[in-house]
Image (tube, rainbow, N blue to C red):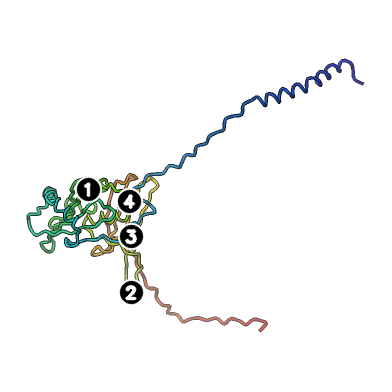
Amino acid sequence: MLRSGLFPIVLALVLTTPFSVALDAQTAVEEPSPAPLHVKQVPPSVSPRPFSIDGGHEESASSIEFRAVAQMTASDRGLLADAESSIAEHAASSGFDLQQGQWSYQQVVCPALPNHLFLRYMRNNGVGDLTMFSASIPRAGEGRVRIIPILRRGYSLFSPAPVNALTVSAFNHIRAEETSGNSSGWLGNGLCYAALAGAHPQIASPNVASADQKSSPALSAIMEVPAHGGEILRFDDAAAMPRPMEWTMTFTPKGKLIKAKHSPAPLLTAKPVPHSTGALRTHPVPQSAQD
């Protein structure tokens, strides 16, 4: 039995409950829905690279072509004729007098740097008396004639041309003058640098010494991508005498050559395996119990 004092309170709760539910429903309807969240995907940062990782062998050539004067195209001979006075002037300032002695020259064909005509000048006065330098001529007038000293009367100027700061600087200027966008092949750039520094570079496939050979060069061409950025090019010149030489070139992420090394290529040592001198031992195999 309910007491009379509690009945009004219970009745008040019953009467106010529907009104409270209706008010909550109205509030839920009238509240505006939140604006949709727009998410913008940020692409991962990509460090700049001087050369394409996937396009290392775009030139597909394993060596640099040297052309005699008669093999040069008419347009290249015309470009050379227009630049002869400039070449002689810049060569003289570097200690090479084209008016003295008998000089010859060849074209150095570098597909990785198509906007330049490269030449190698040489004067051979006999054993130990060889003078040589490289010349670079821009094809489209974007740049200037450059001289890369190699040898003067059999001696390197300042330091050997492969590691000389003048060679590195000239190569950086030549790459900066390339405007076609075709100078991204890392192997072609490396071979061209070696040729301008005096080599006749040629890449050979790795090989292993046979049993009757003491050693054989492990020739290769690779590109390394360090964690801190930039790229390192390495390749072995199989044509170098008296033994193959390894070239190493370090580039910054923006494509500037900062260091070049030239050292003997590592050798693989092969040792013949001697035949066993002991008698061949045999062990009888017992027959199966079922036989």
Q: Is residue 83 left or right of residue 224?
A: left
In x, y percent, where is residue 11?
Answer: 83, 19
Disc 1: which residue: 140
Task: Determine the residue positioned at 65% across, 24% down.
Answer: 30
Note whether 267 is above or below 46 in the view shown: below
The alpha-carbon separation of the residues under discs 3 and 2 comes to 33 Å
Task: Give SS at disc 1.
Answer: loop
Q: Secondary structure at mark 3?
A: loop
Q: Are marks 1 and 4 in contact (CB under 8 Å)?
A: no
Which residue carries the number 2 mark?
212
Whether label 3 touches label 2, CB < 8 Å: no
- What is the quadrant of the N terminus in the image? top right
State how far apart marks 1 and 4 are (Cα): 19 Å
What is the CA distance from the residue labelled 1 to the residue labelled 2? 54 Å
In the foreground, 201 or 37: 37
Q: Which residue is mark 4?
A: 184
Asked which secondary structure carries label 2, the reply is loop
> Closer to us: mark 1 or mark 2?
1
- Amino acid type of disc 3? Ser
Q: Nearer the viewer, residue 138 or 255?
A: 138
- Judge left or right: residue 94 versus residue 163: left
Label 2 amino acid?
Asp
| Labels 2 and 4: the sequence-earlier one | 4
Query: Disc 3 versus disc 4: distance between alpha carbons?
Result: 13 Å
Closer mark to the observer between disc 1 and disc 3: 1
Which amino acid type corresponds to the residue marked 1 in the rendered image? Ala
Q: Cα distance, mark 2 to mark 4?
A: 42 Å
Q: Quadrant of residue 110?
A: bottom left
The residue that label 3 is drawn on is 60
